[in-house]
């Protein structure tokens, strides 16, 4: 299978503080990859460089197909309602219907907030909207930065069901998570440590990480 996301030797420093020191990652369609690491180890920095919102100092990131990026900070506008967000993003993605947005609202259980301005949503509901906007156009590659923050338990379980569905449908998914006790969910679990990625365990046939050569 061909990789839809391939990062090689990604480096990033903030001033003199080196955060990524040659990170490698390869993700194929239908693979669910978890990135774990201590607070401040550079997980969000890694995802931003993969998404292209932050320029790496060195290395390459190759991505084929469409991208859905769910950053840690919600991209929503406080004055717009949930429904307006869905309509505006659907227009930006040139979608012909709002069906997927409706489906995601239902799946994540917040359709009753359709007419609520984003500024009046709770943190968890705001995050549901943030996630919905990242998934709206059914992207080939998903980069999710702790996307379930603030979710109640039931929504949290629904979130993983949703991720499972996307994986089955052949989407490539990279998710930053602290929940390493659920290792079975993932095809590949990578630790971000000292600026490089190391495969911890994986059920897939090949490691997506080129370990130790940098
Ligand atoms: N814009 C920035 N300018 C300077 N330093 C930054 C910037 N963004 C992040 N850092 C620093 O880079 C390091 C990695 O940050 P990052 O947010 O990528 O880590 P993380 O693993 O996602 O952390 P957490 O688990 O707490 O979310 C931290 O030491 C952080 O303080």
Image (cartoon, rainbow, N blue to C red):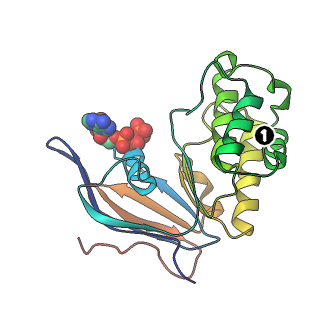
In the image, is residue 103 above or below residue 112? Answer: below
In the image, is residue 27 above or below residue 50? Answer: below
Residue 118 occupies quadrant? top right
Tell which quarter ligand 1 is in. top left
Closer to the camera, 118 or 44? 118
Q: Describe residue 66's horizontal placement relative to residue 166 as left or right.
A: left
Q: Describe residue 29's horizontal placement relative to residue 165 as left or right.
A: left
Give the tally of numbered discs: 1
Q: Please tell me which residue is depicted at 77% across the width and 46% down the height of the picture.
A: 158
Residue lying furthest top: 120
Closer to the camera, 109 or 60? 60
In this rendering, does residue 69 appear at all?
yes
Q: Please tell me which residue is depicted at 50% across the width and 68% down the height of the picture.
A: 201
Q: Describe residue 208's horizontal placement relative to residue 120 as left or right.
A: left
Location of mark 1 (residue): 108
Quadrant of the snapshot with the N terminus: bottom right
Q: Please tell me which residue is depicted at 23% across the width and 70% down the height of the picture.
A: 214
In this rendering, does residue 39 appear at all?
no
Closer to the camera, 88 or 211? 88
Q: Please tell me which residue is depicted at 67% across the width and 23% down the height of the picture.
A: 80
Residue 81 is situated, as x and y percent measured from the top left of the image, at 72, 24
| Dot 1: element | loop
Does the beta carbon at disc 1 come under 8 Å from ligand 1? no
């Amino acid at each position: 299978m061909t990789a839809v996301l391939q990062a090689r030797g990604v480096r990033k420093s903030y001033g003199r503080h080196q955060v990524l020191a040659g990170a490698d990652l390869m993700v194929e369609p239908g693979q669910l990859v978890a990135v774990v690491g201590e607070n401040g180890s550079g997980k969000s920095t890694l995802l931003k460089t993969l998404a292209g919102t932050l320029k790496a100092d060195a290395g390459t990131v190759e991505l084929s197909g469409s991208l859905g990026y769910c950053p840690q900070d919600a991209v929503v506008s406080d004055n717009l309602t949930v429904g307006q967000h869905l309509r505006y993003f659907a227009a930006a993605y040139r979608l012909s219907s709002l069906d997927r947005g409706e489906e995601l609202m239902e799946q994540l259980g917040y359709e009753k907030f359709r007419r609520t301005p984003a500024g009046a949503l709770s943190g968890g509901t705001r995050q549901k909207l943030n996630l919905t906007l990242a998934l709206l156009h059914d992207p080939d590659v998903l980069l999710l930065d702790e996307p379930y923050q603030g979710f109640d338990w039931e929504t949290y379980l629904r979130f993983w069901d949703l991720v499972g569905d996307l994986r089955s449908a052949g989407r490539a998914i990279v998710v930053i998570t602290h929940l390493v006790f659920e290792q079975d969910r993932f095809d590949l679990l990578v630790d971000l440590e000292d600026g490089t990625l190391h495969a911890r365990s994986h059920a897939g046939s090949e490691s997506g990480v080129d370990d130790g050569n940098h």
